[in-house]
Image (cartoon, grey):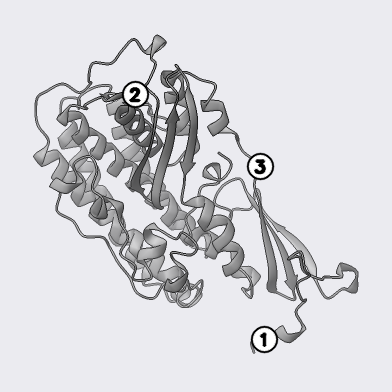
């Protein structure tokens, strides 16, 4: 027999927006979810107020990780900023490299060689696959399917092998830099990438059978964590969180950048806007990224430079100006706002990461009236990375 609490007895909000809660009454209890709980998508916490096993209020807390990137960048030269930006999002660092490099190039009037644009697009899709694989393992683990995380970590490591082969690093690649990329594809890379893609496709079939066809996973995710499509714009919801609700937002198609206008794809869309649909949209997104990687490798020019001529980076001064560069990362619209004043340092850098709106404003609204046991599953379904909040 299920228990339905009497919501009419929930505390009222005071004029300052806080709840009128008497914790000494024994009716309410405060719990901290995180920062080390496995259901937290990184180093952040949610302060829960519960009545029985149902959440009546929630407040997010960050500050447990590296912070202040934007202010740090203002105190570094343009080339010194380059190895900092990737720390803003550890599981998908390359997107920060691209956005920063593209912003510098636009203000400095630098033309990137075509081959570099193709390699950049390849790297971003490889990073997207890595990010989704981490997500799928986390979403399954939040509902007790730990084996999925082992499978997805395995194929993610295979893609990290390709990153190491290409860039020399597995996590922070620092390969996309202002002017282009650091090198061409190594000999035999295409063949080894195809082997990795086949392994990913095989694993995705197993993930679908064990996770998406699992009665327990369906019962705990279908209809849970619904996002009203009417809230998408008001809360800045983008990426799979929006597409799972039928809102087909994808910067790669809507405002093409790099070589996406030369690739054949359509954004993956769902309609039920719940945890299950968001997971399924991301699973299908991986399949699309696998196809895009194959298209890129087939269409990529074989010769040409990969780096434009740039000034002496130790004395690089960029003319006064401002720009905003956007793109579609695995979690939605990602952007860099860069302001320059003619000196050798950025005047202002602001990072627009989707985690800020998804993990704070949206989460705090959605988590109310949720059962405690579903909190982890909901948080993972929004796919957030706390460093984007603490930037």
State the SS at label 1. Answer: loop
Q: Is residue 20 above or below residue 298?
A: below
State the SS at label 2. Answer: loop
Q: Residue 160's spot in the image, x, y percent?
A: 35, 36
Q: Residue at x 39, y 31 (%)?
A: 170
Towards the viewer: 292 or 179: 179
State the SS at label 3. Answer: loop
User: CA gap, disc 3 to disc 1?
Assistant: 35 Å
Q: Residue 333's spot in the image, x, y percent?
A: 38, 51
Q: Residue 267's spot in the image, x, y percent?
A: 26, 60
Q: Residue at x 34, y 42 (%)?
A: 127
For the N terminus, the image quarter is bottom right
Q: In the displayed structure, does residue 373 sit left or right of residue 294?
A: right
Please report whichever mark, 3 or 2, sits nearer to the chain's N-terminal start. Answer: 3
Q: Residue 189's spot in the image, x, y percent?
A: 19, 31
Give yes or no for contact between labels 3 and 2 (Cβ–Cβ under 8 Å). Answer: no
Q: Is residue 301 above or below residue 243?
A: above
Q: Which mark is residue 63?
A: 3
User: CA gap, disc 2 to disc 1?
Assistant: 55 Å
Q: Residue at x 32, y 33 (%)?
A: 102
Mark 3 or mark 1, whichever is nearer to me: 3
Question: Which residue is labeled 2 in the image?
Answer: 168
For the C terminus, the image quarter is top right
Q: In the displayed structure, does residue 336 sit left or right of residue 360?
A: left
Towards the viewer: 140 or 72: 72
Question: Which residue is labeled 1 in the image?
Answer: 4
């Amino acid at each position: 027999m299920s228990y339905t609490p009497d919501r009419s007895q929930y505390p009222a909000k005071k004029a300052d927006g806080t709840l009128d809660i008497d914790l000494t009454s024994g009716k309410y209890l405060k719990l901290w979810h995180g920062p080390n709980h496995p259901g937290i998508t990184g180093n952040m916490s949610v302060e829960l107020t519960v009545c029985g096993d149902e959440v009546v209020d929630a407040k997010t807390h960050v500050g447990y990780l590296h912070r202040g990137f934007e202010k740090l960048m203002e105190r570094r030269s343009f080339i010194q900023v380059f190895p900092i930006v990737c720390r803003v999002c550890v599981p998908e660092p390359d997107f920060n490299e691209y956005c920063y490099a593209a912003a510098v190039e636009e203000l400095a009037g630098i033309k990137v060689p075509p081959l570099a644009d193709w390699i950049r697009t390849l790297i971003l899709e490889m990073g997207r696959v890595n990010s989704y694989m981490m997500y799928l393992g986390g979403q399954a683990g939040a509902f007790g399917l730990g084996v999925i995380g082992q499978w997805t970590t395995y194929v993610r490591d295979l893609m990290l092998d390709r990153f190491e082969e290409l860039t020399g690093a597995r996590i922070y690649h620092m390969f996309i830099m202002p002017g282009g990329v650091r090198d061409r594809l190594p000999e035999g890379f295409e063949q080894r990438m195809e082997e990795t893609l086949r392994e990913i496709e095989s694993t995705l079939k197993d993930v679908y059978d064990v996770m998406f066809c699992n009665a327990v996973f369906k019962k705990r995710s279908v209809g849970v964590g619904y996002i009203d499509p009417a809230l998408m714009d008001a809360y800045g919801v983008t990426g799979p969180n929006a597409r799972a609700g039928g809102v087909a937002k994808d910067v790669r198609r809507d405002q093409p950048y790099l070589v996406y206008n030369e690739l054949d794809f359509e954004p993956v869309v769902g309609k039920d806007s719940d945890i299950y649909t968001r997971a399924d949209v991301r699973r299908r997104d991986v399949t699309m990224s696998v196809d895009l990687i194959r298209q890129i490798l087939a269409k990529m020019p074989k010769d040409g430079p990969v780096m434009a001529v740039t000034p002496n980076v130790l004395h690089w001064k960029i003319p006064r100006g401002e720009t905003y560069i956007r793109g579609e990362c695995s979690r939605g619209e990602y952007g860099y706002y860069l302001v320059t004043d003619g000196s050798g340092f950025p005047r202002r850098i602001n990072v627009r990461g989707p985690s800020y709106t998804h993990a704070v404003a949206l989460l705090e609204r959605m988590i109310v009236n949720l059962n405690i046991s579903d909190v982890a599953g909901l948080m993972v379904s929004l796919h957030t990375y706390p460093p984007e909040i603490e930037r």
